[in-house]
Amino acid sequence: MDRFPALTPRPELFPTALTVLKALVLARWLAWAWMVGIVAVSGSALRHPVVAWLAVGAAFGVTAASTALVRLAPARLMHLPFVATEVGMAIGLSIVDGYVFEPGHVFETTQSIATQFPLLAMASAGVAFGPVVAGLLGLALGPAEWLGAVLNDFPEFATRHIVSFVATSLFFAACGLVFGWQAGLLKRVEGEIADRRARDEVGRVLHDTVLQTLALVERRTAATDPELAAAARVADRDLRAFLFGSAARTVADLETRIRSEVERVRRDRDGDAAVSVSVLDDGCRLVPAHQDMIARAVGEAVANALEHAGAGRIVVFAETDDAGHVFASVVDDGEGFDVAAARTSHGLDESVIGRVESIGGRVEITSAAGGGTEVCIWSRAESPAG
Amino acid sequence: MTTSREPIRTVLADDHELVRSGLRRELEPDFQIVGEADDAEGAVDVITARSPDLVVCDLHMPRGGGLAVVERCATVCPIVILTVSEAERDLLDAVAAGAAGYLVKSTPVDDLRAALHAAAAGEPVFSPSLAALVLGEFRRLAKAADANPLTEREREVLQYVARGKTYKEIGGALDIAPKTAENHVRNILGKLHLSRRSDLVRYAVEHGLD
């Protein structure tokens, strides 16, 4: 069974999330080191150095926990307990900042001991719970700063101080929104890529196994059991269309038109000829209605080969020239016929020649008894050279 | 095909037992199966040991795939890729690696036998869809390089192959010997081989350098 690759289940964490989480761990250590530095150099500016060092210890705990988790169970970094702890710590540090420093510190330009932890908490919440939750949590940072200022024994608040708290709230809310939005975007893109990969993988497996077998059944039973061969062919075609067809191409270009027209004709008829279609479209400049007309004419020529020629092999080829005009040919290895007589009896006159001439093109049919038939279609009457 | 000829000593490489047994039944007695392999390395070993006249090889196989077999054994004897893949890259890579032919597995039995006989005789054989792809590849090269790497006659011949014509029919239509048509195709594949083999050439072509 090792021919079948194991289909990998969708991981709980999308790959980029792991990278983001790792980056956050690094950022936490940097923020923590900065925090240690601030507390260490503040010296006499600290009223409560012990509390400040306890805060440093708490930050160390969260940072170390995130380091351990990213190695052992990275998904937990996106679960409520950790995210709530981190956001709570960020808010707590913002409050404690006012308590540990001498009065007047809060609105001075000296650094807060919370350093970048509020920002990291927003990123963490955004990755875990999306923009709305992270944005709402961000709003809490303003009141936290206010509480810190109260604990800092700030004498009285002027309007500019209130504005500062509101600005803090808005800033962190915006950070939460942006982080959450970006994380969501990443997640969606990665989801799409993962889906596509899974589909390709399924396609490859089916291609290597089921299509192989169908092709074999089709070929082996062509002579002995036409019904089984036809069933295999239909299954083969449908599976191909499902795997490589509709999803891959949505715009109806010349190739799609010709292929779908040939498929339609084959579906309606019993002939079990092998039909190969190749189209080289280097920029077809025909209007869509004319492309449809060419495709229909090609389809009718294939139908004719299936119905009247008893062909074993039909080759459809189409290409565009430098001016964007189309040349198409339908070649079969069937019994051939008298072209002059068949024009009317086989309905070639109307179905093929009439269609092509109505858009200003021309048709040439060459056929020899026993030597197969070729229908050549040009989308314009004159060749570019002549 | 005439039965008076010596049977063609053939190696089959395909990871599906079902496919190999099917092919064996369809190809004997014109083709004498002198070895089988179910992966690329096994195929290389068998080919080296038996030096057959012809190898029929699947593309998607364990341990290297058909391309590895072609790359390592193309000089020993003609290798025809027989696959379900109609993917452009697979076709072009196989030809570029030096495969003598590329056929899709849904090829009717009689056509398959005829094509393998031709391949054993040294003719390049492939499904018309490959010819169309090769044609398309050269157009892209030509567009990028602002010079057509195919001569007018080669382009003409290739177009006929893409349309499903035999070398004999092409010879008749263009007033040349079938052998000449065949040589044109061989040259075209040689050019493709060169153009894909060297990244340097490709880079130069893409950037219009000489």
Image (spheres, rainbow, N blue to C red):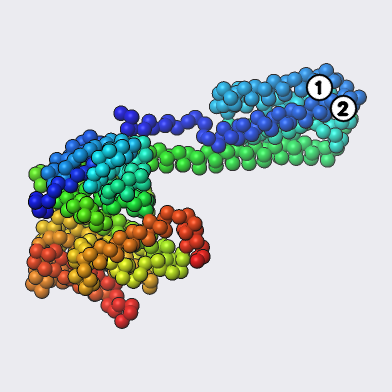
Q: Residue at x 14, y 51 (%)?
A: B110
Q: Nearer the viewer, residue B202 or A163?
A: B202
Instruction: Residue A354: give x, y in percent of width and height.
Output: 20, 72
Mark 2 residue type: Ser
Q: Residue at x 51, y 65 (%)?
A: B209
Q: How many residues crowd around disc 1 within 10 Å: few (fewer than 14), some, or many (20 or more)?
A: many
Mark 1 residue type: Ala
Q: Which mark is residue A42?
A: 2
Q: Nearer the viewer, residue A301 or B175?
A: B175
Labelled pair 2, 1 in contact (Cβ < 8 Å)? yes
Report the side of A364 relative to A59 (left or right).
Answer: left
Q: Residue at x 38, y 56 (%)?
A: B193
Pointer 1 residue: A52
Which callout, 2 or 1, points at the residue further toward the start of the chain? Answer: 2
Q: Nearer the viewer, residue A171 or A278?
A: A278
Secondary-structure class at tag 2: helix
Is A11 located above or below residue B81 in the figure?
A: above
